[in-house]
Amino acid sequence: GGGTSTGDGNGSDGGDTSIGSDGGTSTSDGAGSAGGTSDGSGAGSTGGGSTDGDGSGDGSTGGTSTGDGNGSDGGDTSSGSSDGSGSTGDGTGDGSGSGDTGGDTGSSSTGGDTSTGSDGGETGSGSSDGSGSTGGDTGSGSTGGTSAGDGIDSDGGDGVGTDGGNSGDGSGTGTGGDGGEPETNLTGITPTIKAIVDGDNIATTYNRIDGADNYTVYYSTTSPAYPSGNTVVKTNLRYTIFNPPAGEQYYFQVVANAPGGNSGVSAEASAMIDIPEPPTSPIDDASTTISTEAAAFANNVTWDALDGAEGYTVYYSTSSPAFPSSFTSYVDNTTTSFIHSGLDAGTTYYYQVVATHTLGDSDASNVAYATPYADLKGVTPDLLAGAVGTDILVSWKTIDGAESYRLYYSTVAPAYPGGAAVEAYDTSYTLKQPDVETTYYFQVRAIATGGNSNISNMDDATVTIDCSDCGDPEVGAPSVTVEADVNKNVVRWDAVDRAESYNVYWNTASFPQGNTPQDVTNTTNSVFAHNALDSNKFYFYRVAAVDASNTEFFSNLVYSRPHRTECNAITPATDNDPDLLAYYAFEGNLNDSQGSYDLTTNGGGIGGYVDNCLTGTGGYFDGKGGYGYNLDFNDESVTGIMDNQWSISVWANADEDMPKFASILSTTAKNSEAGYADGWDNGFQIDVNDDREIRWFFSKTGNDPNQLNSRVALTLGEWYHIAVTYNNGTARMYVNGVERKNATGLDLGFNRLKVGVNRFGIENWKGFIDDLKVFGRTLTPSEVVEEFEGTLPDKVENVAALGLGDQIGITWDAVEGVGTYRVYYSTSGNPTVADNFFQVQNATATTYPGALAEGVTYYFRVAAVNNIGAGELSDATNESSTVISSPKFAAQGEPDYVATVDDNTKAVAIEFSPDGSKFYLIVGRASSDHKVVQYNLSTPWDVRTAASEATMNLTYGNPYDAYWTNDLVWNPDGTKLIFLNDSSASDQSRIRVYNVPTPYDLGSVVATNPMPEATFSIEVHSAVTIDHPLTFEFNSSGTKMIVGGFHSYASNQQAFQRIQEFDLAGSYDFSTITKLSATSYNTFEYGDDDAIDEVIWKADGTKFITLNLNGDVHMYSVSDRFDLSNSTITKDGLVMNLSEVSTNQVYQSINKFEGLHFNPAQNRLYYIQNSDSKILVGSMPFSW
């Protein structure tokens, strides 16, 4: 072999052998020595390699074959710290041999760049000397060895090895000899290759090819790898790419190399290190359930723990939803509750909670909300009272957090606790029209759930009247009294001897005897009705008796304030009768609504127009001479009366001082009026006689007497309907719809039309005239009745309120022809038409339907209702009130006992088998699968003896369909189990029906791996009445279903609660279901929560009850059995509240209620609360 240099010098030449020996090796930066020389046909030996020096030693020049042999490989560069270059293999063969490829490039040590040795040059064919091409850059290769043997081909010339980096020339001269071996040729052979992932690396392996000197591996991150990919030449059968990036595909191909010819290119193999899946959060896609409870200036927020959570974030806001854009509070992982304090009382706060984890947070929970209340204990309001005009205004400072204020007032001090209590929702209250010259005392307290304030200071006020002239009457003067009525005052006095007449003086302020006001009336009566007044003013009156010498003797001064109109005043509907010739509605004017015959005033204005409780606004004729007329309304001008067939309909109300012979209307002018006289002729008038009997008075007659007298004497101050009909000489007179008199052979007609005065133009009507109609035909008796009944009903009389322990009863006298009454109520003094009311059908007694507050005074007034509207409220003298103590709805210390079925499960519905031997609970949380659990009772109807049996999981393929199952019923024979599904997670609400092999046995359903045999949609969001149905109930035949729940898109929270009715053509046949007209939410009492959670019919279908979440149970009556859409529904009132419990009861922490059930006799009740599966049992505290 070649010599070895241990330092930086050149290794010595290798010795001559038949096969040139390997060149020497440099252990440092020196160049390896030249390869040995072969004199025969053997190959020159491999040039010496450079071992691991610190510098950049070069591999030596390859050995040289002088014959036809191949020049050997150049030496491998060692792993130096810099760029060692492989030297060039030189070839000098005379024939076709070629110089081999330059040596493999060694890998540089840390920090060094590795360069690649270039290919050795090929020798030329023929006799000329081939030159090897240049090798690497740096080290000098030593002289190649020479072969003197015979080459395979003809002798070649002298080959000259070209330079390595700083190459020395090596050449050998030889003559080809005999005995050379053929070169290996791999043409036609294709290697096989594969790529694998080996941990964090990618490796390619390929099969061994016999005769291959080495292998060129092509690799790339794009396909194909060959020919343009990166390459590496390997002598082993594996190549590894270390730590490639994950997610990038590497492609490989390989070629086996041999002197006689390389193999074909292999197929392509590829491999990729997958991008590792990130670690998954244990709470990914999960969520918890949150709930809230109001407290004083705070909300208590709780939620279910979520396995794997590292902590919780609570989001809160004053609008929904709270997540994700609201405020946050952070809570550590050991806590599942949070007290949100320092809040504004009366403001609703919304909450959601997110469980947190380093690897990812949970979904947001449901939205829960609560409204904190105030605790006002220790707070004392400051109150001030004072007279303002004829009223008393009471005011106090705002108390933060107050839900309302309870004002107490009395004419005896102190106002609290014995005075009348008024519930106010502002910081002031006006006591309207109190008694004058009477001191009223006032105190107030602020009301809040967390505790009421102290009672305030007491203040008082008195409405005084400046009446310095209210002294004694003069001697010989009358004694005067005044009485207030609706829109009028009636002044009365005793007759005085020697008085010829009386002057009535009046003003809206006190006046002395000598200061005679302009407003004066002279009369011979002893009564003066002062009408069409302002109910907000006081009127002062003085009466003077006038003797024959015209001397006045003045009375004392009296005063009064009239009552205001208290009815739902209406505007009369348009009368479209084709024969209606003229219609005077007196709605603020004297116009004919038919448009042809408006009235003109004569003798001054008529007096005014005032709202009445009959037809709207009526014309008031004050009797001072003014009236209305139309000269064109006569027989010659009005076609409709030319055929002597006509009718008149009119309403009239006479004042207490109306004179006799006063006329409502007349059709002629005996004397000259408005320019000329008609004479008496065939004219007539409708008037009263000296007994104030209503009559039809005329002149031209075929027989005597010359009038039709109804013999109905007016009750002054009351309304009467008068109608007269005429048909070619036959006349009929009606009063209040009843025919009173008739005659034949008459000759009557119209010369003109006058309203409010008689034929002479004197004796004016004093009082109201309204709805005067003239028809161009003879009305039939039934048509006359229709005119009479087309007004508001009469006023209700004798209203009384009765204390009934925990209720208030109201009674009144019936109004003829009326079956409906409105009961107006208020806790703020006398009710008006603007206050709340409830209606009562076909009865004259009822009870107040609402919840009663302790110590509050309730006021009631009643109005009759017909098809026109509600009439006048009952008189102020009939207003009644009752003060009661705090009610207790749960009677006899109920509940009797509590059975805890499962403390860890929320129950949402309860149902029993008919014999009470089994009951069934739907249990589950809102966003989790619901299930039905059957419990067998060893003692029927005693839930304390319950043992759980079969459990049926309510899954239907879509898990959301199982989350919101809210109620269940059995068909009558127990062979069908029917469920009600909410639409919270889908677009519709559904009924699901299961077949039950063994009646009422849930286990027989579970054994069949149940799926519903049928599913029916009952509500869809595009046409929804209840988008969250919570309960359903059926009539006895299963042909009518009512569904209760709430509508979350309603305009306000009170409108949330809904009940919807459905028809079924067959018993429990939901394929024939028909949605009926919706029942208005106003039909049902608002229970301080937004949902109806249970509906139960009375066994006979005449009543039903509803359960609100807060435990309120309300009762309603229906006019048609088991029917809502066709019934008149009457609120019977609050019959119990399940959360009202006394201190000796067993279970007192009930919050919300979701299920209620009665036994078959409906004298025992079972109910469940919202938070767990506790069943509370008690006897019925109310009667159907």
Image (cartoon, grey):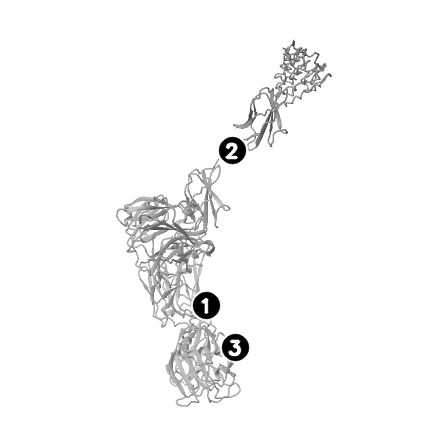
- Residue 724, given in percent of the width and then of the height, sits at 42, 82
| Front in this rendered view, residue 253 or 755 | 253
Q: Is residue 143 visible?
A: no
Q: Say left or right for 252 vs 997.
A: right
Disc 1 target residue: 389
Residue occupied by mark 2: 276
800 or 462, nearer to the observer: 800
User: Of marks 3 and 1, which one's residue comes earlier in the chain?
Assistant: 1
Please, is residue 336 above or below residue 741 in the view? Answer: above
Please determine whether, in this image, residue 750 is positioned above or below residue 395: below
- Towards the viewer: 50 or 81: 50
Query: Of callouts 1 and 2, which one flags the residue occurring earlier in the amino acid sequence?
Result: 2
Under mark 1, the amino acid is Gly
User: Looking at the picture, does residue 670 appear above or below residue 406?
Assistant: below
State the mark number for residue 595: 3
* Label 2: element kind: loop
Instruction: Give, as a three-letter code, the residue at label 3.
Output: Gly
Q: Residues within 10 Å of mark 3 (few under 14, many from 20)?
A: few
**Which part of the image, by quadrant, shows the N terminus?**
top right
Q: Is 1006 displayed left or right of 287 in the figure? A: left
Residue 60 location (% of width, % of height): 66, 16
Q: Quadrant of residue 14?
A: top right
